[in-house]
Image (cartoon, grey):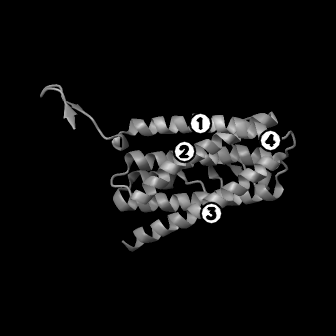
Amino acid sequence: MTVGGEDNEIEIRPWWQNPVNFVAIAIAGLILGAGIGYFAGDSLATPDFNEVDEGFLQDMRYHHDQAVQMAYFYLTDVDDPHPRLSMFAEEILLSQQMEVGRMIQMLRNFGVSEVNDTGVAMGWMGHEMPIDQMDGLASQEQLDEFAAATGDDASRIFAELMIAHHRGGVDMAQYALENAENDAVRSFAQSMIRGQSAEIAELQAVADELAVD
C-alpha cells in the first residue's frame, strides 16, 4: 500500500512485514520479562545457592541470547518462512526473553554477577569450555550457512539448529535440577526441561516435513 503523490510515495507495510515491529516486540518482551522476573524471583529465591545455581543461570542467559538472535533473524530476513516455524520464532522472542528477566533477578538476589564475563562456561557441570562453544550453541560457520540460505533450506536449517540448541539447554537444565541448591532455580530448570523437550518434538516434525519436501 502506498500513500502520497506520485513523487512522494510512502510504502505502508502490514505490521508483520515490518522488521521494526519485531524489535519493539523483543524490547517489550525483555522489559516484561524483567518485571515478571523481579516479582517471581523476589518471592521464590532464597539466600541459599551454590556454584551450580550461579553458573547455570549465567550460562543459560548467554545460551538464550543466541536463540533469540536466530529467531529474530528468521522472522525478519528469511524469505517465505514456514508458518509453524514463524510462530515458534515469535514464541522464542517473547518467552526466552522473559526467562532472561527471571534469571537476571535470581542472580541479583544471590548478589552475584548477572553475566558470565569470564569467557569460560560449563565449569559448574565439570567440563569447562569457551563460552561460545557451550552445548547446543550454533557455531559461526553454522550461523553463516543459515544466513546464506533461502526458502525451505533456511527453514530446515533453523529447525535443526533450534533442535540442537534445545537439546543442549535441556542437558544443562537437567544437571541443574539434580545439583542446584536453590529451590527457585531447580523449579526453573524443571520448567525448562518440560517446555523445551516438547518444543524439540514439534521442531523435529517440521524438520522431517521439510526433509521430505
Nearest the eye: 69 or 145: 69
Disc number for residue 197: 3
> Tags 2 and 1 in contact by the CB under 8 Å rule?
yes
Counting residues from the start of the chain, the first of labels 1 and 3 encountered is: 1
Which corner quadrant of the image does residue 10 belong to?
Answer: top left
Q: Position of residue 196 (x, y in %)?
A: 61, 59
Amino acid type, label 4: Ala
**Residue lying furthest right:** 48
Give how far apart the Cα atoms at labels 2 and 1 are: 9 Å
Which of discs 1 and 3 lies nearer the camera? The answer is 1
Give how far apart the Cα atoms at labels 1 and 3 are: 24 Å
Amino acid type, label 1: Leu
Q: Position of residue 129 (x, y in %)?
A: 70, 52
Secondary structure under the numbered disc 3 in the rendered image: helix
Secondary structure under the numbered disc 4 in the rendered image: loop
Amino acid type, label 2: Leu
Badge 2 crowding class, 10 Å Cα cut-off, few under 14, some 14 to 19, many 20 or more, is some
Which residue bears the numbered disc 4?
45
State whether residue 163 is above or below residue 26.
below
Which residue bears the numbered disc 2?
94
Q: Identify the residue shown where x is 31% and y is 41%.
A: 14
- Horizontal placement of 212 versus 61: left or right? left
Q: Position of residue 204 (x, y in %)?
A: 51, 67
Counting residues from the start of the chain, the first of labels 2 and 4 encountered is: 4
